[in-house]
Image (cartoon, rainbow, N blue to C red):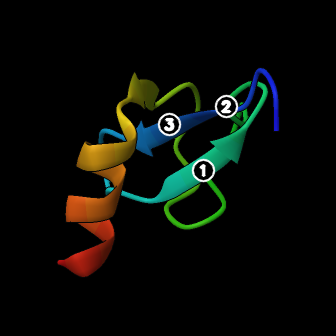
Amino acid sequence: MAGKKFFRCNVCNDIHYGLKPPRLCPTCNVENAYVEVTGDEASWVMKG
């Protein structure tokens, strides 16, 4: 999937994989809370 990246919500740690982060986090409803992260960090967060 060319161009897709991992993004993590700074508030609730929700992980999003896509071309750009959502404006509103679907888990905690905070606006503009996503930052780009590496695949390794996304995997670590998902393992909890």
Residue 16's disc number: 1
Residue at mark 2 to residue at mark 1: CA–CA distance? 7 Å
Residue that protrudes farthest toward the front in the picture:
2
Which numbered disc flags the more N-terminal residue, 3 or 1?
A: 3
**Marks 2 & 3, CB-CB < 8 Å contact:** yes
Residue 13 appears at what percent x and percent y?
A: 32, 56
Q: Is residue 13 left or right of residue 20?
A: left
* Residue found 73% across the figure and 25% down from its top: 20
Per the image, the residue denoted by label 3 is: 7
State the CA–CA distance, disc 3 to disc 1: 5 Å
Asked if labels 1 and 2 touch by Cβ distance under 8 angstroms, the answer is yes
Q: Secondary structure at mark 1?
A: strand
**Amino acid identity at mark 2:** Pro
Q: Callout 1 environment at 10 Å: few (<14), some (14 to 19), or many (20+)? A: many
Q: Which amino acid lies under the numbered mark 3 shown in the image of this protein?
A: Phe
User: Which label sits on residue 21?
Assistant: 2
